[in-house]
Image: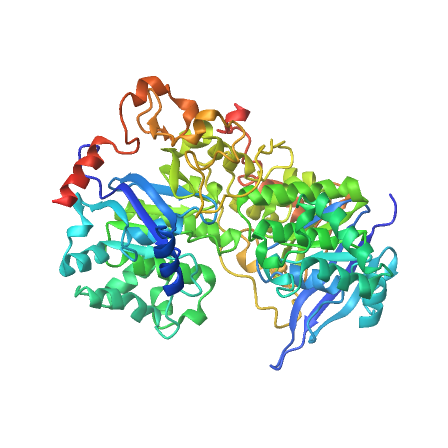
Amino acid sequence: MSNETPVLELRSLEKYFDTSSGLFDAVKNRILGDGPSYVRAVDGVNMKLEQNQVQGVIGESGCGKTTLLRTLIGLYNPTGGELLFHGRPVSEFDKDEWKEFRRHVQIIFQDPFNSLDPKFSVRRTLAEPLEIHNMEYDDERIAEMLESVGLTPPEKYLTRFPNQLSGGEKQRVAIARALITEPDIILADEPASMLDVSTQAEILNLLNKLTDEFGVSMVYISHDLSTVSYICDTINVMYLGRVVEEAPTRTLLAEPKHPYTKALIQSIPIPDPHYDRKRPDLDGEPGDPINMPEGCRFKNRCPKRMDICDRKPLDIALEGEDDHTVACHLYYDHDEVEGDQPEPTADPASSATSAGDAA
Amino acid sequence: MSEPILEFEDVDITYRTTGDSDVHAVNSASFAIEEHDYFGLVGESGCGKSTLADSIVGGLDDNGEVTSGKIRYKGEEIQDYSESEFNKKIRWKEISVIPQSSMNSLDPVMKLSDQAIEMAKYHTDLTKAEAVDRLRELFDVVGISESRIHDYPHQFSGGMQQRTIIAFSLFLQPSLIIADEPTTALDVIMQDQILDYINDLKDDWDISMLMITHDISIVFENCDSMAVMHGGQMAETGRVVDLFDRPRHPYAILLQNAFPDVRFPDRELAVIDGHPPQLLDDPDYCTFADRCPWAVEDCRRGAPDPQEIEGDADHRAWCIRADEMEDLAADHLAPATGETSILEEDT
């Protein structure tokens, strides 16, 4: 599996938003000689999504996880870096390839109450993507899909409209709509967070089952580590636009390394009155994404801050664990690793593609 | 034990509708909050928990009404209070509310200090300067810099707004605070800090609290007693540890199993099928019967009466089969035993 090309690969992907608004700012910047100031919402994210793998991205609001997702599906053009779909950079796609890409990459939104067209019956909601992509279909196919997302008997649901469905049923329809084009990748933006606990468990179990059954890969975004851990194979922890730690779910929960990851895990309430949870020694909130501190972005809240934190930490794989990387100065010997590398984030693979892009 | 600070006795609340039938949102709710206790009320959306909270401070919508039963605050019946009685005797002074969305409950065009002055004007004899001083002290209590009391709400982040609301709720030194989903809109780290402040209030301010949430883990961590509601009926009440160790209502059992626990990512989550009923008639049946794996014919024949669990008058379950639950739901009880937590500090 590791030899195969990843389904989706992100190489130091960046998405910046220009904060200057209108002519006034543009003129002011010109006169003062400033460049425009940017919100660096996604700033150099590397990720490899393998076949049939579920990757989780967690972080607080404003850390850039939704921007990341939108960049992945092509709603935003990345400012820098490259996104590869089956090894091919999407920046080289022509119109037809984009259409093909959109068939293979589907999204499930956070809010099932607003993401279905209120005037579309369930049948039409599921038929529309098939028509758009010129795929053959009949009622049987739609019924089968409804059955596999647990809306049985399907005949009962085919003619219903969203206002006749409960929150959990709506989210099931949204999942069916995402799966019906036989995608390779599903992008899920907190699909369970708006639902009640009992329904949330339903949706999580369903997603778990379906990703196995249909062999799709998934990027699952959430701020809630306890639900993410039920569904994801690997978790990426994001803080102000950067991934600070990546590890398989169990490893991340059992041996978190980055001080931010530790704080996140310690903050989760445990449903057990006998358990005495140690609260994290962490203050404040994520900083301003416009004027971010130099170096490590977490340093102002970090209980373990050192002098060196004014420099940007490298993504370092922990010794003996290839799949556990952490961007924190605590975990590597700086003399040994850095040597004469001037550009810390770039790994050999990504510099190769950026050369390719230029050509 | 001393008299409870707040007591519900067989309270029914209905909403009149323009249709044929009224909505029976809360039916025979009974529970008591002891002095100096934090009481958690859990249940899914639409189970009646917010309606119940609104009725305590006379905040029901115009078409809502407490149709029977008694709500006692410090021994006095308050369910029939008029608007002006609530204003004079209850609101802010005795019972204050931390509403669900703090972002929408502060006046966006008024400085926070002016909002405090306004509150002082209606409810106290404090002068403007004294009101501002009081707010300054309270900002200190909730950990916001005193220099910011003249700011507008939009200058604060979500967590700071929530803390401001907590400061306001303490303004007239109430005895009971109703917190309706106080942390739902917040990230985990901020949620944890807010709950920490809320917990400190108990001893520093000698406060009791009614905490309404759908998040059972918050109740387990922060409350002393709790109640679980389903479909307008009470399911189970008791001390938090009793409900955790010996839950006896099927909904309380399944709800605990449906809740993800970060310590055990491999555990299967329980699924509760179906939906609560619409409550358009006075429910003379157990509203959980249609979703309950252990329902029998009798469950649909009458609304269940509370059963004391193992002779403990404080721990009650509204289920006719509560006695048998230990055997019936054996698979669902004590799921944590035999598993080891994967978290770092536990191993």
Point out the image quarter for the N terminus of chain A. Answer: top left
Q: Is residue B318 above or below residue B203?
A: below
Numbered disc total: 0
Percent across and percent down for residue A163 are: 45, 71
Residue A114 vs residue A69: left or right?
right
Q: Is residue A80 above or below residue A159?
A: above
Extreme residue toward the front, this view: A31
Q: Is residue B39 above or below residue A27?
A: above
Percent across and percent down for residue A352 are: 17, 36
Point out the image quarter for the C terminus of chain A. Answer: top left
Q: Residue at x 38, y 66 (%)?
A: A116
Q: Quadrant of residue A111?
A: bottom left
**Between A346 and B67, which is closer to the camera in this rendering?**
A346
Residue B15 vs residue A172: left or right?
right
Residue A123 vs residue A5: left or right?
right
**Between B55 and B271, which is closer to the camera in this rendering?**
B55
Residue A267 vs residue A330: left or right?
right
Q: Is residue B325 visible?
A: no
Q: Residue at x 20, y 34 (%)?
A: A349
How is the protein colored in the picture? rainbow
**Between B195 and A209, which is closer to the camera in this rendering?**
B195
Percent across and percent down for residue A140 are: 24, 65
Percent across and percent down for residue B62 are: 70, 75
Q: Quadrant of residue A47?
A: top left
Q: Is residue B154 above or below residue B249?
A: below
Q: Is residue B202 visible?
A: yes
Q: Residue at x 57, y 44 (%)?
A: B190
**Between A234 and A74, which is closer to the camera in this rendering?**
A74
